[in-house]
Every structure is written in structure tokens, then in C-alpha cells.
Image (cartoon, coloured by chain):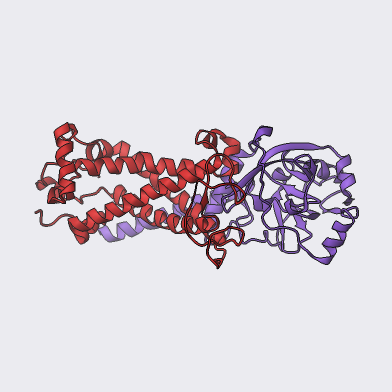
């Protein structure tokens, strides 16, 4: 056998072995929930590695919490309220009519007012909002654990994701069911001891403190529990779906 | 495929080294993979900086707090005061995808390089300065050679001089680990698992500032590295890193 043909044979063998390894990894990855919904395309490998690393090493981790003395005196709200007529009407009525709809793969759909949310289990956390742009601030967030809302709705075992929508039609996002049931994932309605101000997402903001700020969507009015994100765009910013990094 | 090379940087190429490529194959492959990944990291990192060219110290920082320093660049966010009258387009989507994908690539290349480097004795033989070079007068001589741009500073064709060795070791074992650490310390999911990654650096914003400073150090190294390669004979040195065997030892 010539050197050249042996080289080709070796290269072919290596390629076949590589393909088999990748196929096995992909199957195992799907089996253990290591593959994010944006695993395709040019950057799919990096996104899959980021999400898989979180699933392997960080599933049960807790976002850092800070002492009260570290609460930022001057937090930064970034982009503020959607000044649509509908939103202004809600705001004029102090959001008394604001409802968060919970539907999809649940035993019973819910329509929750802020009073309903306050009547459910309450949780507070002093965590950092970390923007993908680089800036950050620490605040005390008070709200209802998303897990409590999902439990009240009777989330089905087939549920794999929760999609959450802002009243601002340009904003929505989704997280996996693990993140949704995490004790630090809150539907917040209070900040630093008072009602959540509108610029910071009031009346209701999703807080996902283990991920970057763009996953903490403001003005939440709908939660969709689903077994698949097919047909649902992955968030609004053309950013990575998994935002722990 | 390991080859024995003279550990003393003063040694000239001899008959044995003339027939094997100057750099072992794993060094050549990881060198170019790292070059590609670092280039992508630099471009995407610079782009991400444009969305907030302000740097802080401590845990938190935003446009309502005083920055440690500001890079005088325009920004891709209207909320950032820059002094420029225009706002750049938001490119953070692909920049962040590319940054982390390249980070995984550089991590893989770095692990292969360090593991094979330890196993083959690459660091011991080619990068740790030889005993003769570790004497005080030898350091002085090689530093003076560099300051005078003397041909001796550009290294022998078969080995590295002591300053070169020390700078490569610093890049591999100090700058890259620091870049990885300070990068990870900015990720909320990483600090959830390992809070010390951020707290040891003084907080998340300090980590971000360190990430920039170490990047500047790496850019400085790259400029000096490419300059030295050019002065030493760019085509020949690049050919050597591509696997050419030295045909005509000088």
C-alpha cells in the first residue's frame, strides 16, 4: 500500500470514528437535556457547550446573593416602559386590571392579578442584574417564585419550557423547566421594599438571576408552558437563548 | 515524533536538528488554532466593549455610577454618554456567539498544548531558560541584545533565547489563565457555582476591568512577537511554524 492511500484510509477512518462519536454525543446530549434549542447553525457548537456546561456543573447552583449594604443606591433602569396607550391606561389605574395569564401544558389556566400573586408564597432576594453589555447593579427583588405559580396551575410532566411574554410586543423569552422551577426564579412585583417601579419592569417582571439581564423580561402579562419551542422565536434580541454567560 | 533539541539557546543548529521541522507538530497546530481563535476573540470582544466602553471597580457599575476609566470610543447604545453625536449599530448578538465559541476553541487548543507540552518535555527543554541563561550576566546580555536590536536578539534558527522563553511561558501560564478566569468571573452562571471567581478579584466589575487589562497585555505581546518575527525574517519563521524543515542553516 502506498503512503498516500494509507493516509487517505486513516483519514477516512478517523472521519468515520469522529462522526460516530459526534452522533453518540448528540444522542446522549438530547437524552440528558444538554442541547439548547439554538444548537443549530454556525454558533451551535459554542451554544451547546455553554448550556451543557451549565446543565452538568450548575443545575443546582444558586446565584450570588448580597448583603443589604451592597444594594445599589443608583440602579440603572435601561430601556423603560412601553408608552403604548394600553399600558398607560393600566398604569393610570395603578395596574389594578393587570393580569398574568398562565396557559399551555397546565391542568388549569390562570389569570393572576398582582393581588393574587401577593397572596401566593413570597420570596425576596438581593441579587445582581448583569447586562450583557457589561454594566450591573444590585437590588432587593420581592416576588412570587415562578415554581409556586406553575404548581398552582398544575404543570404537566410533559412541560419542558416556559415562554414569558411582555406587554411590549417586542419582548419575550423562554427558559427550560429546570430554570423555571428554580427557587430564585421569581415573578417580581417589589423592588427595594416598595412596588416594582415601571422603569424597572413594574408591575411584574421575570427575574432569572443565574442568567444575564435580557432574560429578566419586564411587563410580564403571559406565561406559556410548553413541551416544545418549535414555532416560537427564541427571544427578541437575536441573542443566545442560554444566557448564563 | 518528539525530537531532541538543544536546551541551551546559544547552541547552533546541528545536523540532527536540520532535518526535522523546527517546531513539533502539536505546537504548530495549536499555535495557528490559537491565533485564529484569539483574533476572533479580539474582534468580538472589542465589539462587545462598544456597547459599554466604561470600566468600573468593585461589584457593580453602570451609567449612574462613576467609572474607573472610560475608553474614548463611540458606543452602540444610546444610553451610554460618550461625547459622540452618533450611536453605532448593535452587533452584540453575533459578537457574543463568536466570543464564546472562540473561547471554547482556545480552551481546547490550550489544553492540548499544555498536556502534550508537559508529556513531551516541550516546556522543560524549549521554554524554561537553560541553566547558563539563568545567570545574572546572561539576563543582562540578552536584555542588552534586545535593546540594541542586535541579531542575537532574534534568536537562533533552532532555539529560543531566554527573554523569548520567559515571555512565551508568561503568555501560556499567566496571561491565558487570567483571561479565562476573568472572563468566567463575569458569567452569572459561573459565579453561582464558584463565587470566588468574582470575589477574589474584588467583584464582577473588577473582573471585567482585569479582563480588559490582560487583553491589552496580550495585544502588547502579539505586537512585539510579530515585530520580532519580522525582524528575524518573517517568511522563514512563518514557514517554520507551518512545518518547513530548515534547508540552509545560517
Q: Return the x and y of residue B223 as percentages of the image width and height.
A: 30, 54
- Report whether B161 appears left or right of B196: left
Report whether residue A159 is seen: no
Report whether residue B141 is seen: yes
Q: Return the x and y of residue A187 as percentages of the image width and height.
A: 78, 46
Q: Quadrant of the C terminus of chain B?
A: bottom left
Please state which of residues A167 and B131 is positioned toward the viewer in this rendering. A167
- Residue drawn 17% across and 32% down? B136
Q: Return the x and y of residue A151 as percentages of the image width and height.
A: 83, 42
Numbered marks: total: 0
Question: Which chain is in red here?
Answer: B
- Residue drawn 21% across and 61% down? B235
Please state which of residues A21 and A2 is positioned toward the viewer in this rendering. A21
- Report whether B165 appears left or right of B32: left
Please state which of residues A190 and A99 is positioned toward the viewer in this rendering. A190
Q: Quadrant of the N terminus of chain B?
A: top left
Write down the colour of chain A. Answer: purple
User: In the displayed structure, would residue B22 be above or below residue A118?
Assistant: below
Q: Return the x and y of residue B107 as percentages of the image width and height.
A: 43, 46
- Report whether B246 appears left or right of B75: left
Amino acid at each position: 500500500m502506498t503512503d498516500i492511500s494509507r493516509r487517505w484510509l486513516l483519514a477516512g477512518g478517523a472521519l468515520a470514528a469522529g462522526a460516530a462519536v459526534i452522533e453518540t454525543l448528540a444522542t446522549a446530549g438530547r437524552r440528558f437535556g444538554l442541547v439548547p434549542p439554538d444548537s443549530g447553525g454556525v454558533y451551535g457548537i459554542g451554544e451547546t457547550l455553554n448550556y451543557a456546561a451549565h446543565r452538568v456543573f450548575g443545575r443546582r447552583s444558586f446565584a450570588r446573593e448580597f448583603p443589604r449594604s451592597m444594594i445599589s443606591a443608583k440602579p440603572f433602569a435601561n430601556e423603560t416602559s412601553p408608552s403604548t396607550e394600553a399600558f398607560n391606561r393600566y398604569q393610570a389605574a395603578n395596574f389594578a386590571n393587570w393580569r398574568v395569564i398562565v396557559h399551555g401544558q397546565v391542568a388549569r389556566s390562570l389569570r393572576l392579578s398582582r393581588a393574587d400573586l401577593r397572596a401566593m408564597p413570597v420570596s425576596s432576594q438581593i441579587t445582581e442584574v448583569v447586562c450583557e453589555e457589561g454594566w450591573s447593579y444590585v437590588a432587593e427583588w420581592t416576588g412570587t417564585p415562578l415554581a409556586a405559580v406553575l404548581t398552582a396551575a398544575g404543570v404537566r410532566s410533559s412541560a419542558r419550557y416556559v415562554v414569558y411574554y411582555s406587554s411590549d410586543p417586542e419582548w419575550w423569552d423562554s427558559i427550560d423547566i429546570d430554570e423555571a422551577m428554580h427557587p430564585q426564579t421569581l415573578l417580581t412585583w417589589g423592588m427595594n421594599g416598595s412596588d416594582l417601579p415601571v422603569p424597572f419592569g413594574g408591575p411584574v417582571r421575570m427575574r432569572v438571576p443565574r442568567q444575564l439581564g435580557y432574560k429578566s423580561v419586564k411587563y410580564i402579562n403571559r406565561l406559556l408552558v410548553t413541551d416544545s419551542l418549535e414555532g416560537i422565536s427564541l427571544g427578541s434580541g437575536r441573542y443566545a437563548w442560554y444566557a448564563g454567560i | 515524533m518528539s525530537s531532541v533539541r538543544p536546551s541551551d539557546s546559544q547552541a547552533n543548529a546541528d545536523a540532527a536538528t536540520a532535518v526535522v521541522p523546527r517546531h513539533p507538530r502539536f505546537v504548530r497546530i495549536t499555535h495557528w488554532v490559537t491565533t485564529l481563535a484569539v483574533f476572533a476573540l479580539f474582534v468580538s470582544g472589542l465589539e462587545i466593549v462598544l456597547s459599554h466602553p466604561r470600566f468600573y471597580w468593585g461589584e457593580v457599575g453602570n451609567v449612574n455610577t462613576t467609572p474607573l476609566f472610560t475608553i474614548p470610543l463611540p458606543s452602540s447604545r444610546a444610553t451610554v454618554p460618550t461625547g459622540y453625536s452618533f450611536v453605532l449599530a448593535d452587533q452584540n448578538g453575533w459578537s457574543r456567539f463568536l466570543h464564546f465559541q472562540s473561547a471554547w476553541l482556545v480552551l481546547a487548543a490550550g489544553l492540548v498544548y499544555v498536556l502534550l507540552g508537559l508529556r513531551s518535555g516541550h516546556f522543560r527543554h524549549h521554554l524554561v531558560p537553560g541553566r547558563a541563561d539563568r545567570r545574572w550576566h546572561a539576563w543582562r546580555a540578552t536584555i542588552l541584545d534586545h535593546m540594541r536590536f542586535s541579531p542575537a536578539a532574534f534568536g537562533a534558527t533552532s532555539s529560543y533565547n531566554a527573554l523569548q522563553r520567559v515571555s512565551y511561558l508568561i503568555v501560556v501560564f499567566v496571561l491565558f489563565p487570567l483571561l479565562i478566569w476573568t472572563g468566567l468571573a463575569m458569567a452569572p452562571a459561573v459565579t453561582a457555582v464558584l463565587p470566588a471567581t468574582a470575589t477574589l478579584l474584588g467583584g464582577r466589575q473588577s473582573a471585567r476591568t482585569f479582563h480588559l487589562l490582560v487583553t491589552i497585555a496580550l495585544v502588547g505581546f502579539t505586537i512585539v512577537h510579530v515585530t520580532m518575527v519580522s525582524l528575524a525574517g518573517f517568511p522563514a519563521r512563518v514557514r517554520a511554524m507551518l512545518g518547513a524543515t530548515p534547508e540552509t542553516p545560517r
